[in-house]
Image (cartoon, rainbow, N blue to C red):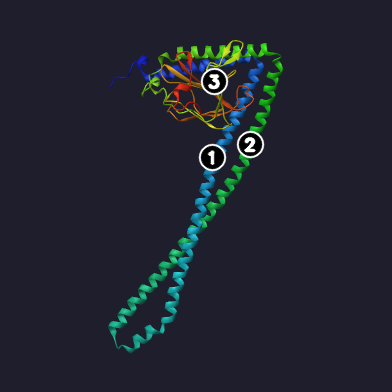
Amino acid sequence: MAALPAERDPEKQLQQVRERIEDLQRSIRRDTDRRDSLSAQLRDAEEKVRGARGRLGSVRKQLAASDARLSGLTAERERNQKTLREQRLALAAQLRTAYMSGREEQLKLLLSQEDPAAFGRMLVYYSYLGRARAGKIGEIEAAVAALEQAAAQEAEERERLAALEAGSRKELSSVDSARTERSKAVHAISSQIRNSSDTIAKLKREAAGLEKLVANLRRALRDLPPGAGQAFEKVRGRLAWPTSGKIVARFGQPRGGGLKWNGVMIEVGRGNEVRALYEGRIAYSDWLPGMGLLLIIDHGGYMSLYAHNEQLFKAVGDRVEGGEVVATVGDSGGRSQPGLYLEIRRGAAPVDPVPWFRRPTP
């Protein structure tokens, strides 16, 4: 079968789109570094928090796995101990039987010669008994070896568990240190804002940055291979919320200075899972001024945006399914408390997200 031309090869197209978006992300970072050093400091601090949280999560997963292995090894050791006890009891019973019958019984039968058939049967019996004793001894030796091996593995796993616990404490300290750096960066930005006009100007810059990003992404995504599945617009009124919480800002509500909310702000605890609304492909996964750690999923003509995350689990170009965990809730972007900001866009235009869900509010 002939290879597809480069312009028709979906994998080639996807790689080209991914490279364009990654160039766009690098460009945004350079612009932030050049124009707003405080925002750059905040970004770096929040990405340290993200990295420390990610490492801490990884260590905790390893801890859970190690703890499960340790429980299994402990149970195996206890089974081996039980088997060893049973085998020893069985051997003791055989030895008692042999002792009670006595070796002189064979000699009496041999000397009496009264019943050669009985003598033959007795010899066979004694040979079976001898083999059984030898077999039990072999089983005991195997049980002892298995017990020693399980005990050694258990000791090794306990050492590994102790090391992981030490690593967990270290990463937790790293999270605390990174969050302290973030607090300093947030305070520096807050100190720079002297009045409400400064706040509005900052909001307008951030809103313009998001609009520019969406426009650039739409241009970059034009060559993206189409995704399979039901069209996003047909699931209106049937979606599940990406996380559970209280809506504290709604679509269309004023934000000051003529700005309005283009999505909903959901107040929810830090670390809660954020799930994709619907299947699609990751179009953006990086930090953006005002949005913090931002994830954008392209659904083919529609986009869903998830902002202020603490961790992002997906990279540009990744396919995701509806309901798949893609991030965790945070306060990145300089927020004073954790929460998730959610937008749905039809093309470049934001639409009210609430009617897209099965129930009015989470």
Q: Say few, some or many: other residues with alpha carbon within 10 Å of mark 1 (under 14 / 14 to 19 / 20 or more).
A: few
Q: Residues within 10 Å of mark 2 (few under 14, many from 20)?
A: some
Left or right, 253 with respect to 83, comes to right
Report, in whole angstroms, how far the alpha carbon at label 2 lies from the one at label 3. Answer: 35 Å
Q: CA distance from mark 1 to mark 2?
A: 14 Å
Residue at disc 3, secondary structure = loop
Circle 2 residue: 172
Dot 1 amino acid type: Lys
Which residue matches tag 3? Answer: 250
Task: Tell me the element at label 2.
Answer: helix
Of the image marks 1 and 2, the number of the one nearer the N terminus: 1
Image quadrant where residue 122 sits: bottom left
Q: Are marks 3 and 1 in contact (CB under 8 Å)?
A: no
Could you tell me residue 261's position as x and y percent? 55, 17
Sequence-first disc among 3 and 1: 1
Q: Amino acid at mark 2?
A: Leu
Q: Mark 1 — residue? A: 61
Q: Nearer the viewer, residue 212 or 69?
A: 212
Judging depth in this view, the residue of 31 and 326 nearest the camera is 326
- Is there any visible trace of residue 106 in the rendered image? yes
Q: Nearer the viewer, residue 357 or 94?
A: 357
x, y percentage for residue 167? Answer: 61, 40
Q: Rounded to the nearest whole Å, what is the CA distance between mark 3 and mark 1?
A: 36 Å
Query: Mark 3 Cα within 10 Å, few/some/many (few <14, many 20+)?
Result: some
| Label ID, residue 92 | none
| Circles 2 and 3: CB atoms closer than 8 Å | no
Q: Is residue 282 visible?
A: no
Where 117 falls versus 63 (above or below)?
below
Above or below, 114 against 82 in this view is below
